[in-house]
Image: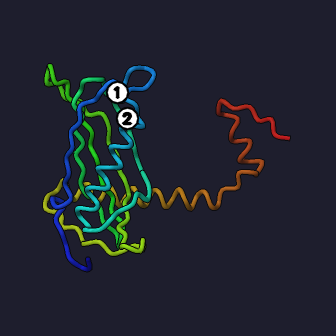
Amino acid sequence: MTADFKPVSSSKISISELMLPSHTNFSGKIHGGYILQLLDQIAFASASKFSGNYCVTASVDTVNFLKPIEVGELVTMKASVNYVGRSSMVVGIRVEAENIQTGAIKHCNSSYFTMVAKDKEGKSVPVPGLILSNLDEVRRFRKAIKHIELRKEVEEHEKVTNVNSIEDLAGLAKYNVLLEIS
């Protein structure tokens, strides 16, 4: 695909799955790793649907586990492309869990996956531009821009920070750490 444009709606995907006892961790809640697997799958589906290409996960910028998910709850994940670059897309995903007996719904997770479109040889390929149709889509696009800017700031800060300096080591005194460096 080249300089075509597609609406956010062309990337929307929704999946629902009943949480089973086999999905639990040692505390009896649904395992975060299982939710991450589902998040990666829906991010792939959303990005591939939008770009028309195979997509790979480049990074996971944010995964906030807000509330635990219980066995027997119906988990619904909603994904859409929030931002596009040249070959990359930021896919936003919202996870809700519904108690199917009471109908109560809780927001359990918000995640942002950066996906890259690839051709058959594994080379990055351009993705369509994004048509923003409402203010909520504009908000999500601007939020993605801010996340990208902050990530670049952190990367730049890591390049210039000297973790071996006396000042840096002295700054660790306010944390719950004991330095025993020989």
Residue placed at 33% from the left, 58% from the top? 90
In this view, 111 is above or below 142? above
Q: 115 or 86, which is in the foreground?
A: 115
Q: Quadrant of residue 33?
A: top left
Tell me if 59 is positioned left or right of 91 in this view.
Answer: right
Label 1: which residue? 68
Label placed on residue 65? 2
In this rendered view, identify the residue nearer to me: 89 or 177: 89
Q: Position of residue 92 (x, y in %)?
A: 29, 51
Q: Amino acid at mark 2?
A: Phe
**Crowdedness near tag 1: few (<14), some (14–19) or many (≥20) residues, C-alpha within 10 Å:** some
Residue 38 sits above or below residue 25 on the image: below
181 vs 131: above or below: above
- Residue beneath the point at 39% across and 60% down: 56
Query: What colour scheme was applied to this rendering of the protein?
Result: rainbow
Q: Residue furthest bottom?
A: 2
Q: Amino acid at mark 1?
A: Pro
| Residue drawn at 32 percent across, 56 percent down | 44
Disc tally is 2
Q: Quadrant of residue 31?
A: top left
Position of residue 92 relative to residue 25, above or below, is below
Q: Residue at x 15, y 20 (%)?
A: 101
